[in-house]
Structure formats: structure tokens, C-alpha cells
């Protein structure tokens, strides 16, 4: 049986449990392909039993977060996970649900156990129990009956159960009788039935082992000796039905292959095979129509280039065989992979990377807030009244702003605006309205990029309190279009899915400026305070293109921000003033809204919003120059610490009275 164990997924899982894994491993998938199970590495180099979304990062099971283990089976809906973990110093079979963990125990209370499969409804767990003597027994566990030795009525010898049908009434695995080690199929009514091997019936010596079973229990897959010549005994994947018996599925040109899983309908078999000249191993997918083909060739037939991967092992497939998961090498890293061929999209991806790419979408929402903030704190960083008295009642302005966000955001933004204003009440009241266009783009590196652009309207009302502060209220309404080009690691580089949505933002800023409250020689110091509320909404949208497009729900969020600052104005000459500002900003909300949606045909996601830096500082200078009695120009430059303002921004303005 040693030759079969080298190819057996559970044997490899035990090797992973007892060694030090180099990355995540996948061993199980739910019927719809939305949930996967396996193991992930911890910072302390433990392989932890984990489950997660098919396109997301896996998380250790609660109660097993610091225990070496692996998930080896999932129920059809992914709500029940089974496997093996170190509990009480021994490897023990477990069954896990969101309600908690159940140690399934052993047959004699002294040895070890391992759960290798679970029925589709999650009620029956199968695997093996190792007695204190070292003997192995195939076991079946239920809530009502506890742990049961299903090989008890068969001749003595080691046995192990690997998989169960949807209702748990059919169990498959391997049984040793004397020198004969064969695949078996067990039912409550018929007991354990020897399936023989590719080279003979129940009494023949060549070995075989069953590793998977279809939903209704009628199709069994596994591995069997396919030749008895020595050296170099060949082991081939097989598919068994009562009508056809055990059918050899062949290889990818090499000596050996083994089946790792079967679809619920029994029509698709996946596993691993050696290649020509036994030069390596590749994951395979088999159907009656195509025969055995590598997963890479299956993808290539759908137009997917997977040259960036070496897909070495397929461990499981979903109900209809359209999704296959397994393990392989990308670059120099051992990684879990998920491959799909579907009308919804075809490709291969690295689940943990895909999850990160979803989170990057939140950047487009933050950009809408950032554009609104730049309107208020770019050319409108000063109230209209701060530019002084006008020789006429009316004025015109034209402004332009540019800004750059560094510190990991790598985005650029630009704005242009024109407006009109008018004085009332002898200059004590000034009102203005403007229209503009803005755009922002961000490079997200391997996760693609996004661009947001559109129009905005501003309105401002300033009032000079007699012998008091200048009070101002500014309203901004922005209507933008966001184009998101989301990238994620694909078969031979970065794959992209694209989407477009509308983004609207409304902001109200209330501000008080105490103009020239203090004098320091020829310089005047003016303190100010502002409170801003911004409401932003982005619409729902569905991506197109790429192997794994997603649908995103709409997002809405209200941000509240305060600023306190000092402005000092110093005359340079009769027509030029220098104004310096320093301010502190604080954002009362610390997180963007949650990101919700669905990876089409795979899973739903609900990711927590991105945390925002809540406090930062900004400093700037303005140069105001009077070109003539009615026309002036201004230039400003600002630098900010890491926060929500651009790290560096500049604006230029032209103002004229008429």
C-alpha cells in the first residue's frame, strides 16, 4: 500500500500536518464552489486547519487557531468542515460548524483519528481511527451513533474511509486483507464490498484505493495498480460504476496517476498524473468526452493562458466540475489555486490575491471623498471674503488645482472651476456660485487602477459679523463617473475585470475666521475653525471581462471633519501679500463603508471598510498679487502629513471685479 500512499491526498495532508508547509493548501470545496478548505501557515510556522471564500483568504477555524491541523472535507454548502488536528497531544478527527468544534474521538480512547470526508448534508463524517496497537480502522461518525467501525464485519486488516455520498449511506475507502489491499464501497445494507483492482477481482494481489464518490454513491474514483511489472509498478486513476466496473483513466504520458476528487454528478474526475518520461506531475481533469487532460490544457481550450503557473495537483471539484481547486507553483512560491471554465468567466487565480483585489475597489469610493475635500480645501481653502473688499459689487473667478497623494495611495487629482460672486449689505455679505470639472486617477499596481471624473457645483455665503468673525457656509455637490479596472493574479500575469458606476457627493462646510485678530508688526494673524460633513454614495455595478468578474453593491457613507488653523498675512509690497497657514485636521469617522457583493458564480463577500488616518497636519503659503485695481492673481502651495489631504497640492486663481 506504500506506493498508493505516496499519491493519496490524505497521505499528503498528513505529511503537511507533520511538516512545515510553505503556503496555503486546498483539499476541499463546497458544491457551488464558493467555500474552500485546507490549511494555512501561521507566523509560528504551524499549518492551521482553515476555511474561506473560494476567492478570498482562508482563516483558521475558531477553536483551532493555534493548533496544527488541516480541513480535509466540506459539506455541500460549506457549513460543515472536517479534518484532523492536534487535540490533547494527539491527532484527532474533528467536525466543525459555526456553533463550535466537536472532537470525534477514537475507537479505543487511546489512539488517533482523522476525518477525511463528510456527507453532503454534513451529518455523516468518515475517516480512520488508529488504535493503540497501531492498527487502522475505517470509521463512520453520526450524532446519534457516535464513532463506528464499518469494517468490523470484514476480515481483519487495516482500513480507512475517504469519502461519503450526500446522505452518508455510501462510504468508500481502502481495506487490507492479508496481502491484498483494495478499494471498497460500503452501504448499510450490503456492508463492505471489495471493488478489486484494474488487474483483477477481489482476490487479486494488485492494490487499489477509493478516494472519492459521487453525490448518489453510484460512481467511485480512486487509484489502482495498472501493471505488475517490477521495477516501476504503475498506478492509474480509475472510475468505477456497477455497470462498467473499474475503468482505467490513463495518465498524462507518464507512469502514474491518481484521482483526488469527483464531481457530484460523477461525470468529472480530477487528480494528479506524472507527465511523459516521468519528468514531473501535473493536475488533471477527466471527462468521458475529453479523456484525461491537464488542467492547463482544459483552461487553454477555453482561451486561458496559465503559463505563469505549474498546476501540480487537483484535489477537488464542485458539483458540475466547472471549478477545480488544487495546489501548485507560481513563480517560486507554493500556492493554492482555483480554476474555472464558465460562461461567467474562465481563468485561474490565487485566492488570497483575489481577496486583496476586491478590497482595492474601495479606493474609488475614497477618491470621491478626496475630490470633494480638494474642492473645499484647494482653491476654496479661503472664504471669498478673505480676498478683501471689491471696487465693484460683482466678481468673477477662475481656479485650477492639482494634487498628489503618496504614502501608498499613488494617486493624482486635478480640478478646474469658474464662478461668480456678488456683495450685499454694503459688502457685509458676499455670495458666490461656481461650476467645475475634476478628475482623479490611481495606480493600484498589481490590483489595476481606477479613474473618477465629472462635474461639481459650489455655492458659498460669507457674512462679516460687526466687530466679530467672518462666518461662511460652503456647499459642494459632485456628480462623477468612476471607472474601475480591477486586477488580480491570473494564469500568466495580471487578469482584469472592469466596471463603471456613478458616484455622488454632497458636502457642507461651516467656517469662522477671526480676521487680523492679532498683530505682529506688519503681519496680521487670523485664527479659523471649520466643521465639514460629506455624504458620498456610489452605485451598484457588475464587472465585465476577466476570469472572475464580480458584482458590487452600492455604498454610502457620511464623513465629519474638523479643522483648526492660523493664517498670517504679511505685505511684501503695495500690490503683493504673502499669506502662510498651518492647520490641524481631524476626521471623526475612522473607516470607509463595508464592501459587499458577489464574485459571479462563486461566493458573496462582505469586507470591512478601509481604515482612514483620523488626524493630520497641513501647512501652506499663498501669494496674492493685484494686477490692477479690479484684477488679481493668486498662487498657493500646500504640504500635508500622511492623512486625507494630498501630500502636495497647488492652486492658481484669477479674480476680477465688475
Image: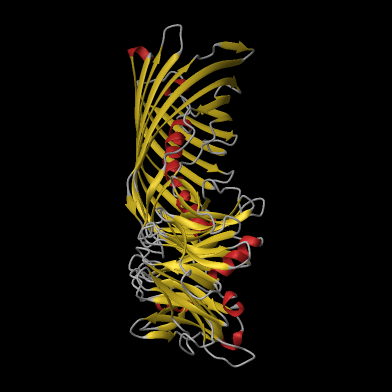
Q: Is residue 641 visible?
A: yes
- Number of numbered discs present? 0
Q: Splitting the image into 4 quarters, where does residue 219 fall?
A: bottom left
Identity of the residue drawn at 54% across and 70% down: 9
Q: Is residue 21 visible?
A: no
Task: Please name whichever residue, 286 or 635, is drawn nearer the observer in this view of the structure.
Answer: 286
Q: Quadrant of the N terminus?
A: bottom right
Identity of the residue drawn at 56% across and 21% down: 567
Relative image position of residue 515 (x, y in whole percent): 50, 15
Q: Quadrant of the C terminus?
A: top left
Relative image position of residue 541 (x, y in whole percent): 33, 51
Task: Please name whichever residue, 590 or 641, is drawn nearer the observer in this view of the structure.
Answer: 590
Task: Please name whichever residue, 560 or 275, is drawn nearer the observer in this view of the structure.
Answer: 275
Identity of the residue drawn at 58% across and 34% down: 640
Q: Residue furthest top?
A: 467
Identity of the residue drawn at 57% across and 20% down: 566
- Left or right: 156 as drawn, with respect to 435: right
Task: Please name whichever residue, 507 or 351, is drawn nearer the observer in this view of the structure.
Answer: 351
- Left or right: 336 as drawn, with respect to 396: right
Relative image position of residue 647 (x, y in whole percent): 57, 38
Q: Is residue 136 above or below residue 143?
A: below
Give the image's coloring scheme: secondary structure
Relative image position of residue 393 (x, y in whole percent): 35, 20
Q: Is residue 610 above or below residue 229?
A: above
Amino acid at each position: 500500500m506504500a506506493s498508493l500512499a505516496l499519491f493519496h491526498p490524505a497521505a499528503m495532508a498528513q505529511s503537511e500536518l507533520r511538516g512545515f508547509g510553505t503556503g496555503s493548501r486546498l483539499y476541499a470545496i463546497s458544491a457551488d464552489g464558493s467555500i474552500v478548505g485546507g490549511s494555512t501557515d501561521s507566523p509560528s510556522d504551524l499549518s492551521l486547519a482553515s476555511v474561506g471564500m473560494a476567492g478570498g483568504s482562508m482563516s483558521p477555524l475558531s477553536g483551532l487557531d493555534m493548533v496544527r491541523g488541516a480541513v480535509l472535507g466540506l459539506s455541500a454548502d460549506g457549513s460543515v468542515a472536517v479534518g484532523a488536528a492536534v487535540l490533547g497531544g494527539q491527532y484527532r478527527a474533528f467536525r466543525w460548524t459555526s456553533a463550535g468544534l466537536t472532537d470525534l474521538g477514537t475507537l479505543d480512547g487511546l489512539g488517533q483519528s482523522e476525518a477525511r470526508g463528510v456527507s453532503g448534508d454534513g451529518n455523516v463524517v468518515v475517516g480512520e481511527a488508529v488504535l493503540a496497537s497501531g492498527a487502522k480502522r475505517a470509521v463512520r461518525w453520526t450524532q446519534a451513533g457516535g464513532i463506528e467501525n464499518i469494517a468490523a464485519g470484514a476480515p481483519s486488516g487495516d482500513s480507512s474511509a475517504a469519502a461519503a455520498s450526500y446522505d452518508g449511506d455510501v462510504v468508500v475507502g481502502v481495506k487490507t486483507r492479508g496481502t491484498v489491499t483494495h478499494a471498497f464501497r460500503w452501504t448499510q445494507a450490503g456492508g463492505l464490498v471489495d471493488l478489486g483492482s484494474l488487474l483483477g477481482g477481489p482476490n487479486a494481489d494488485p492494490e487499489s484505493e477509493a478516494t472519492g464518490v459521487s453525490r448518489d454513491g453510484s460512481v467511485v474514483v480512486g487509484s489502482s495498480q495498472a501493471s505488475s511489472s517490477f521495477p516501476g509498478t504503475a498506478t492509474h486513476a480509475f472510475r468505477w460504476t456497477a455497470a462498467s466496473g473499474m475503468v482505467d483513466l490513463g495518465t498524462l504520458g507518464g507512469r502514474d496517476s491518481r484521482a483526488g476528487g469527483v464531481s457530484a454528478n460523477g461525470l468529472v474526475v480530477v487528480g494528479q498524473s506524472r507527465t511523459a518520461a516521468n519528468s514531473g506531475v501535473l493536475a488533471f481533469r477527466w471527462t468521458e468526452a475529453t479523456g484525461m487532460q491537464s488542467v492547463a490544457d482544459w483552461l487553454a481550450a477555453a482561451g486561458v493562458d496559465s503559463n505563469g503557473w505549474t498546476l501540480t495537483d487537483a484535489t477537488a471539484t464542485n458539483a458540475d466540475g466547472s471549478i477545480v481547486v488544487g495546489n501548485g507553483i507560481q513563480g517560486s512560491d507554493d500556492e493554492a489555486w482555483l480554476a474555472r471554465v464558465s460562461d461567467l468567466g474562465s481563468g485561474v487565480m490565487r485566492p488570497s490575491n483575489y481577496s486583496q483585489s476586491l478590497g482595492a475597489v474601495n479606493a474609488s469610493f475614497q477618491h470621491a471623498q478626496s475630490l470633494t475635500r480638494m474642492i473645499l480645501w484647494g482653491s476654496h481653502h479661503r472664504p471669498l471674503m478673505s480676498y478683501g473688499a471689491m471696487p465693484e459689487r460683482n466678481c468673477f473667478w477662475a481656479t485650477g488645482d492639482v494634487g498628489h497623494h503618496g504614502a501608498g495611495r499613488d494617486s493624482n487629482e486635478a480640478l478646474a472651476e469658474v464662478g461668480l460672486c456678488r456683495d450685499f449689505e454694503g459688502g457685509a455679505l458676499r455670495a458666490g456660485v461656481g461650476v467645475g470639472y475634476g478628475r482623479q486617477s490611481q495606480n493600484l499596481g498589481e490590483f489595476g487602477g481606477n479613474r473618477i471624473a465629472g462635474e461639481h457645483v459650489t455655492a458659498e455665503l460669507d457674512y462679516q459679523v460687526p466687530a466679530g468673525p467672518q462666518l461662511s457656509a460652503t456647499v459642494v455637490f459632485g456628480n462623477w463617473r468612476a471607472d474601475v479596472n480591477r486586477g488580480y493574479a491570473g494564469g500568466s500575469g495580471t487578469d482584469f475585470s472592469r466596471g463603471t458606476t456613478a458616484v455622488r457627493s454632497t458636502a457642507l462646510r461651516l467656517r469662522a475666521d477671526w480676521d487680523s485678530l492679532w498683530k505682529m508688526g506688519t503681519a496680521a494673524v487670523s485664527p479659523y475653525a471649520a466643521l465639514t460633513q460629506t455624504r458620498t454614495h456610489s452605485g451598484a455595478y457588475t464587472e465585465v471581462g476577466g476570469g472572475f468578474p464580480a458584482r458590487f453593491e452600492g455604498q454610502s457613507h457620511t464623513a465629519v471633519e474638523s479643522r483648526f488653523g492660523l493664517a498670517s498675512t504679511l505685505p511684501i509690497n503695495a500690490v503683493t501679500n504673502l499669506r502662510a497657514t498651518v492647520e490641524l485636521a481631524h476626521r471623526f469617522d475612522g473607516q470607509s463603508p463595508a464592501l459587499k457583493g458577489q464574485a459571479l458564480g462563486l461566493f458573496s463577500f462582505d469586507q470591512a471598510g478601509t481604515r482612514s488616518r483620523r488626524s493630520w497636519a497641513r501647512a501652506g503659503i499663498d501669494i496674492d498679487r493685484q494686477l490692477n485695481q479690479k484684477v488679481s492673481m493668486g498662487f498657493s502651495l500646500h504640504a500635508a502629513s500622511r492623512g486625507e489631504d494630498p501630500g502636495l497640492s497647488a492652486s492658481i486663481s484669477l479674480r476680477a471685479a465688475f
